[in-house]
Image: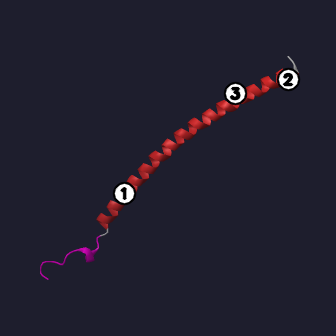
Amino acid sequence: MSQTEQRLTELEVRLAFIDDAVQALVAADAAQSLRIATLERLVRHLHSELETVRLGQSHDPHSEPPPPHY
């Protein structure tokens, strides 16, 4: 095998390794994006629930109608 053929084979092996690494990174990125989207939905839901709880607990006496004897 000539030196040129050997270098070409080496480059092909490196390219195959890089291609595998890129495919693995693409798959990891897709999975990570899905997890992030799920977590964002969960945070929005929890924020909504927290606001509901806060509104239920923070009782502003000024927002209530006056008692009937006034």
In the rendered view of the protein, which quadrant contains the C terminus? Answer: bottom left
**Any mark on residue 4, and which?**
2
Q: CA distance from mark 1 to mark 2?
A: 65 Å
Q: CA distance from mark 3 to mark 1?
A: 48 Å
| Image position, residue 27 (x, y; %) | 56, 35
- Residue type (three-letter) at the residue carrying disc 2: Thr
For label 1, the SS is helix
Region of the chain picked out in magenta, as a range: 59-70
Above or below for 3 versus 23? above
| Image position, residue 5 (x, y; %) | 83, 21
Which residue is drawn at the image coordinates 67% and 31% (left, top)?
A: 19
Q: How many marks?
A: 3
Can you name the residue that lies furthest to the top here? 1
Mark 1 vs mark 2, foreground winner is 2
Choose the circle earlier in sequence order: 3 or 2.
2
Choose the circle earlier in sequence order: 3 or 1.
3
**Circle 2: is it few (<14), some (14-19), or many (20+) Cα within 10 Å?**
few
